[in-house]
Image (spheres, grey):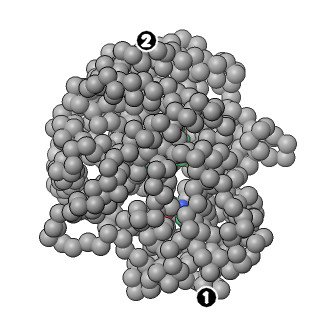
Amino acid sequence: MRVHLVNPSDNSFGTAVITPRWLFVLAAATPAAAGDPILVDESLEPIVPETIMSGDIVGISVHTGNALRGYAVGRMARERGAWVIYGGIHATLYTEEVFEHGHAHAVVTGDGDVAWGRVVLDCIAGKPLRVYAGGRIEGSEFLSARWDLIPRHKYMWASVQTIRGCPKHCSFCSVWRTDGQWPRQRQYQRVIDEIIALRRIGFRYVALADDNFYPVTLTDLRLAREQHNLARVEELTAIRRERFQLMEELAKLPKDMVFFTQITMEAGEDGEFLDAMRRANIKGALVGVEAVTPEGLKAVYKDFNYSGEALAKQLQTFKQHGVHVLGSFIFGLPTDKPATFDATVAMALKAEVTFAQFVMMTPFPGTVDFARWEKEQAAHPTMVGDVPVTRYWLIPPEVRPKMFTPHPSMSSDEIRERTQKVWDRFYDWPSIWQRSACTPSLRARIAFMLLSKLYRQMYAGTGISTDSARRKKSKAWARWTAGQCRKLFQANPMPELESPAWELSFGHTARAGSESEMSPFVVIPDGAD
Ligand code: B12
Ligand code: SF4
């Protein structure tokens, strides 16, 4: 009996940008009794069905973008006699769907770190439950990934999570609903130990796979103080202190390490935080700008963001403190007009963001936007074949519409064409050349330009994505450039690198081997979800 963990993707590219962290975390959660799992990332290579034997256990992760492929893998595995288990954000939101379309034996909702060990042992005993509610575990329970299982020379960036959950409530985002609004921080010592393990094997670029790296704003603290809510002030201060502790430790790591994270624009007001980020070698952050007008920001419940001149200034502040911005903008909001496209690219250029992505409004399940759209569609659902458009992920990729929610004044073709023009304008050679001036050498400047073009080629349409989200085949030159870029990201291994001697001792990878090692979590018996 072997355990297989499969990251489904329609498009196998040989090289991927960011490691799918869940694979290596669930590997750590796999009980020792089951041996080391076989990890299959289909964004690198498609799964070979013959590797799956009767009695094997196959864990499949699905997000909305790769659910259909995930279901095909699950059906194939079940036909070959394996136990088929699903998890991930989409399986959490649509547990019944994975049984119907993916022929699941069981599904894990929420966090898998603790639940997966139990699932594997139950499968070995031949009696898996139908649904395992993994819930939202504490930050202290997050497992460290098994980086010893990573295929070498396949990924450009590793990914390490430092915090989960986000206090905001943007209308297009499911994080605050699934992961919760209370930030769950991992102990910084564990984060550092994991990064050291990565640097030892030659990874120096690490994406901090966080929902929001800046969970406590100066405004949150001010408001709590004004309300004389001392308990709240203390809680917030403790979270903030831990962020700084983490960054202090990151700053002590080898100087060639580069981190990238996701953060809200409010950090632009917090020079102390930005300076700590720079010292910690957090060289860049994806900032959700979303819209450049007040109406647009209101439409996505993001009125804590700035617009106009203040927006440009706020984004420039990041750069002044040494943190590059990947600005993320959304098109297709009901408030968008033809003029919005030019205004947005002009703002992206003016704000001097180093990279930018321009994504089309997509109603993701679990979001406020999705719920509103589903309600509107309830009486007369639009169908594509026999699938309602509100289940768009079940529509075969060849006939799946590119946009789902109708816009009040523009057709989806018009929005798409205008969006592509914005990508072309932002990533034209003169603009890239100008932006590349931020690099320290000619070699770095060339690398920057190559990367910018690759980024435009790979992600125009989806935005920076888990590689498993791309459906279109990439052009040969993009594959070649990706191969070259990957080499640029590689570093010489540093096997001699030691972890600091923490006052508390932590294992690198906790392995769930027996019930007693697992925290209690709710299990839902057969048929009761
Ligand atoms: C880091 C991140 C990115 C990074 C890196 C991605 C990568 N290669 O890893 C970048 C910036 C590249 C990115 C891009 C995008 N992302 Co993203 N991303 C995240 C984020 C913040 C963390 C993901 C992560 O690595 N977490 C750490 C791992 C360990 O957690 P996990 O994957 O959730 O896995 C745990 C459980 O889910 C469960 N589990 C997962 N799989 C399985 C399988 C089995 C068998 C079991 C038992 C359990 C299990 O156990 C794991 C351990 O607890 C999540 C938000 C979130 N909190 O999940 C969004 C998130 C996944 N992204 C999302 C989106 C929308 C995108 C983009 C489309 C954004 C865009 N451009 O518009 C792109 C494209 C990707 C896509 N899914 O289509 C959505 C997905 C929504 C959906 N319904 O599918 C999320 C949920 C955020 C949101 N806004 O709602 N993302
Ligand atoms: S989009 Fe970003 S800021 Fe808004 S809720 Fe999601 S994670 Fe938080």
For the question of whether residue 189 can be seen, the reply is yes
Report x, y in % for residue 435.
36, 19
Going by the numbered disc 1, the residue's amino acid type is Ala
Q: Nearer the viewer, residue 364 or 199?
A: 199
Residue 392 image point, x, y percent: 71, 44
Residue at 62% of width from left, 53% of height from top? 45
Closest to the observer: 98 or 353?
353
Q: Position of residue 515 (x, y in %)?
A: 45, 85
Question: Assess mark 1: CB under 8 A from ligand 1?
Answer: no
Question: Which quadrant would the N terminus be assigned to in this image?
Answer: bottom right
Element type where label 1 sits in the image: loop
Horizontal relation, residue 468 to residue 519: left or right: right
Q: Which residue is mark 1?
A: 125
Q: Which mark is residue 270?
A: none
* Residue furthest right as drawn: 385
Residue depicted at 31% across the width and 30% down the height? 324
Discs 2, 1 touching: Cβ within 8 Å:
no
Q: Amino acid at mark 2?
A: Pro
Label 2 element class: helix
Residue projecting furthest to the front: 492
Identify the residue under disc 2.
430
- The image shows residue 376, relative to residue 436, as above or below, that is below
Neighbours of disc 2 within 10 Å: few (<14), some (14-19), many (20+): few
Which residue is nearer to you in this view: 448 or 96?
448
Seen at 76% across and 72% down, the residue is: 80
Between discs 2 and 1, the one toward the N terminus:
1
